[in-house]
Image: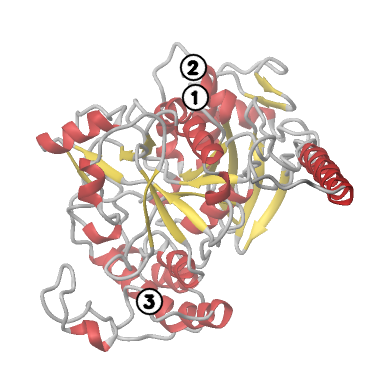
Amino acid sequence: MSIALTRPTTLRALILLFFCFLAYVALHVLSKSLYANDSEKHSTLLFTCEEKNSAFRYGQRGSQYVLYNYIKSRQQFKCHESITLTTHGDTSYLDNLVYLSQRWQGPISFSVYVPSSDYYDAIKIISYLRQCTVSEIKEFVTFHFVFDNSHMPKSIIKLHKTQKGLPYFENQTEILKFHEKNFVKVMGHGDKSENTELPMANCSLPASWIIPTKQTYRNKNKLLYPVNILRNVARESATTYYVFSSDSELYPSPNIIPNFFDMLKRNDSYLHFGKPRVFALPIFEVYKNQTVPGSKQELVEMLESGLAIPFHEKICALCHRIPQQKEWQRAPVNDGLSVFHVGKRHWPYHMWEPIFIGTQDDPVYDERLSWEGRQDKMTQGYVLCVLDYDFMTLDNAFLVHRPGVKVKKEDLAIKYFTQNQSAYIRGTILSELKVLYGSSPNCWLWDEPLPVAMRDGDFPQRKTGGPVVIPLLRPRISCLDSQREAISRNKSLYVLSVSTSSSSINT
C-alpha cells in the first residue's frame, strides 16, 4: 500500500534535507580549518600540541647547572612530526648512541652529566661521534650538559651567540691542551651545525671509548648520579608532543615511529579519548657477544633457545615483567603495530617500572632521588597508578639491553643508599604524593606494607608474608643531600660499580 505525500509534507522533507546538507558542509569546513595549522594540530591525528623553543639557554635545577640544547641536531622537528627518545648518561655511555640512533631513526634528546673535567671529555667524544661515526648522531641527537655547582668546568666553550660575556673560546691555549691528542682545531673550521661549532675530530684515530681511559671525574670523586634531573631535562627539552623516556643502553626495535603513528591513525577515537594512557614496551636482555634482534620473530627465537631472557630476570624479575608476558611471546607476529594488552599498575604488577611512549603531559620524575638509591622511577609509577592510567602494551615493539646479562651483586655501599632512599620515599615523598594526587587502594609503593588481605596471600617472589620493610627513617633534608653528606663523612664507603655484569647507571 502506498501513501501519497501531501505538498506540505514534501516541502518539510526538502527543507530538512537542505539543512542536513548545510550542516555537512559546515562540519567539513570546520574540520579543514581545525587541521589547517600544522603547528597546532597534526594533519591527520586528533591531538593538539604547542611548538617548543629549541634555542640554547642556561638553567639551574637545585645544585645542578644546565646547558639546554648545547649541541643541537641538524634536523629539528615540530611537535606533531615524530616521537623524541629522551635519555641520559655520563661520558662512559655516549658510545651507545652509535647503535641507538640507527635503530631509532628520529629525534633523540640526551642529557649528559659532565662535572668538572668530564665536560671536556664529553666535548671530545661528541665531536668524534658526530664527525667520525654514523650520520644519524649529527642529524638527530641534541645534547644537554648538566654539572654540579661544586664541580664546575674550568671554562665553557662558546657554541652559541647567546652565550653572552664569553669570547669564542675562553682560553684558546687551554682548549687546545684539552684536545691535543684527539683533535686538530683550526679556528673557524670545525663541526658546524646552525650556530654551533665543535672542535675538528681526527677520525684517523680510534674512538676514545675503545682506548683504555682513566676513570671519569665523577667516579674518581664518588659523585652521586642525579638520574631524575637528567631524565626531566631530556624530556622537557624534546620538541615533540610524544616522548619516549628510555635509557641509553636500551635499544628499540626498528620502525617504531612510523608504525606508532600508523597505529594512531587507525584508532584515532579509541587512543585519544577516555582515560590517560601510556604505551609500554617489553624489555629483554641478550647474553654477551650476541646480536641484538631486529624483529620480534628473531627475539622469540632467541628467548626459546635461551640466548635472551626478560630484563632484570636475575636481579628483580617483577620490576619489568609486563602483564601477560608469556602470551605476548606466543602471540603471532603481524605487520605494523597494535595494542596487545591494556592493563593497570595494580598488584601483582605494583613493582612494575615500565618504559613507555607517553606525552609531555605525563608526570615527571622526582629529582630528589639518585640512581645509587634505586627505586628512582617508582614514585612516577605510583602517580600514574593513582591517576588511573591505562598501560597499553605494544605487540611488535620491544627494547633489548646492550648485550650482557646483569646478575645480582652484593654492594654494601649501594645497600646503604638504597635503604636511605627507600626510607625517604616512604617517610616524605609518599605523603606529599598523597596530598597532591590522592590515593587508591590499588596503588602502593613496593616499600609500603601490603594490605592485610594480601600479606599471607600468594605474593610473587615470597611464598608467605609481605615484602621486606626497612625501618622507617624521616630525613629532614632531601635524599640526594643526605647521601652526599654521608659520602663526605666516609668517602671510602662508596665504590661505584657500572660493569655490564652487575649494574649500570641507566637501569
Label 2 vs label 1: CA separation? Answer: 6 Å
Label 3 vs label 1: CA separation? Answer: 46 Å
Residue at the image point whose x is 21% and y is 83% from the top: 455
Residue sitting at the far top: 204
Residue 334 visible in the picture? yes
Give left or right: position of 431 versus 175: left
Label 2 vs label 3: CA separation? Answer: 51 Å
Res 173 quadrant in image: top right
In what element is the residue under mark 2?
helix
Q: Which residue is mark 3?
A: 442
Between circles 3 and 1, the one closer to the viewer is 3
Instruction: Determine crowd level at label 3: few under 14, some 14-19, many 20+ residues with C-alpha closer than 10 A.
Output: some
Instruction: Determine crowd level at label 1: few under 14, some 14-19, many 20+ residues with C-alpha closer than 10 A.
Output: many
In what element is the residue under mark 3?
loop
Give left or right: position of 376 versus 6: left
Total count of labels: 3
- Residue 235 at x, y = what percent? 57, 49
Q: Which residue is mark 1?
A: 129
Res 158 quadrant in image: top right
- Residue 58 at x, y = what percent? 72, 49
Q: 253 above or below 271?
A: above
Callout 2–callout 1 Cβ contact below 8 Å:
yes
